[in-house]
Image (cartoon, rainbow, N blue to C red):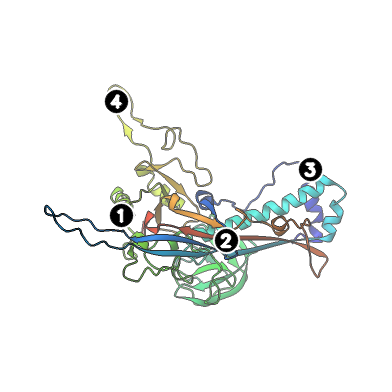
Amino acid sequence: MAATTDVTEGLRYTYGAERILRLANEESPTFRLLSRKKAPMGGRGQFIIPISTQNAGAWTGAAQNGSWPTALDPATTEASFSLQEFLGVYKVTMKLLQDARNNKFAFQQIIRFMDEGFKARFMKMLNADLISNGLGKLAILPAADDETTVTVEALPSCEKGQVVDVIDATDNDAKLEDSATVSAVDPTGLTVTLSGAPAGTAAGDYIVIQDTVASSYSYHTHGLLGAIDDADVPVLGDYGGIDRTTAGTEFWESYVLSNGGTNRSFTEDLGLQAADGMRERANAQAKVYLSNLKIGRRYHEILRAESYYALGSAPSTLAGGLGRPGGKAPEDGKSPYKFSDMAWHFDPYFEANTIVMLDPAHFFLGHGENELPMPVSKLFDTGGLFTETTTSALDVRWYYQAQLLSDNPGAGAKIEDVAES
């Protein structure tokens, strides 16, 4: 919280800069990539999507004056999604507010300073949820590491000050370190420093927000890696309430290309095979590729524009910059690369050795009345931004409902075990 000792620092933001510099990465490209869908909740807090699983009618060849075929009835099912609730709060002291209240610029800048930092943290955590598999993984251990500073396999979504658990990948109920505070994050060395050392770790163990994935908890969205799969979502179970492991529900599975845990190079054949799998399974066309940055660096030559030679001139390219016509440097997930004329997006926090392709029209973020998190006071027009506490400080409380929905998981494909740079 903004404590008494922060008053002077907080007031310094009254002058000088229009924008507050933040040293913590704020990217949330996957969240921005997904479209939004709001529907009347009717007090139920859920989305219900009707699905046709068997076409109506029968059609057959016949002899002259032949008999009509016997009609066949259609069959349907429903995918039902419950929205996940998210709660957030930040705290400011009475002293900080009182010292700034008679100067509207000081007061506005302090609230802006707190709001922007809170929103950056929340959106980053929500993005980590959306690229996970229902477990909300903030970081994954590539190997056993029972130290306070653990190495992780990709850029961690952890932030300094968070309270987290280290979870056993083979048992979501087992905490290898309970309620540890993150004291440092090194994005270059890919390490996270905790207040306590986990014990008995192994490759695949992961870090999550405390008390959110044990059997009695499921406080996460399904995530793209949970939705675009051929198995049920860990902890959360059946995706949309449809059991993918039951015969007759193959339509609810995505196309998955794995290699038994052994990494191999990404090739044009793999990409085209996944695209063909989507077309065969769901009559869907991939529009977007999504991966981490390491994969982009390794396969730059495949993803960049084709080169050509013209008689009497030096080699040139069919497009400018880094790949696309008018190619520009990447910005919040937007990439200058294309593959088979489909956009390739990079999320720096995306799971290692994995490529996902999808049609965003079939994967969207369902939400309640508010499309983005917002203070509770704005939700209900109660007027006051601050909530009383038992100390000389006030809370600013935020609320949000959301869930990653799909009306056709077959419109996504996943390529696993891809070698990185």
Residue picked out by circle 4: 310
- Which residue is farthest left? 63
Q: Residue at x 39, y 49 (%)?
A: 298
Residue picked out by circle 1: 277
On screen, 327 above or below 130?
above
Disc 4 from disc 3: Cα separation: 58 Å
Disc 1 from disc 2: Cα separation: 35 Å
Examine the rendering and report whether any part of residue 228 can be seen: no
- Which residue is farthest top? 312
Q: In this image, 342 relative to 38: left or right?
A: left
On screen, 329 above or below 376?
above
Q: Nearer the viewer, mark 4 or mark 2?
A: 2
Task: Work out whether residue 94 or residue 314 is closer to the camera in this orientation and state it.
Answer: 94
Task: Work out whether residue 262 or residue 291 is closer to the camera in this orientation and state it.
Answer: 291
Three-letter amino acid code of the residue under disc 3: Tyr
Disc 4 from disc 2: Cα separation: 61 Å
Q: Nearer the viewer, mark 3 or mark 1?
A: 1
Callout 2: 10 Å neighbours few (<14), some, many (20+)?
Answer: some
Give the mark nearest the N terminus, 4 or 2: 2
Q: Which mark is residue 15?
A: 3
Disc 3 from disc 2: Cα separation: 45 Å
Instruction: Assign a secondary structure to mark 1.
Output: helix
Three-letter amino acid code of the residue under disc 4: Ala
Three-letter amino acid code of the residue under disc 1: Gly
Residue picked out by circle 2: 41
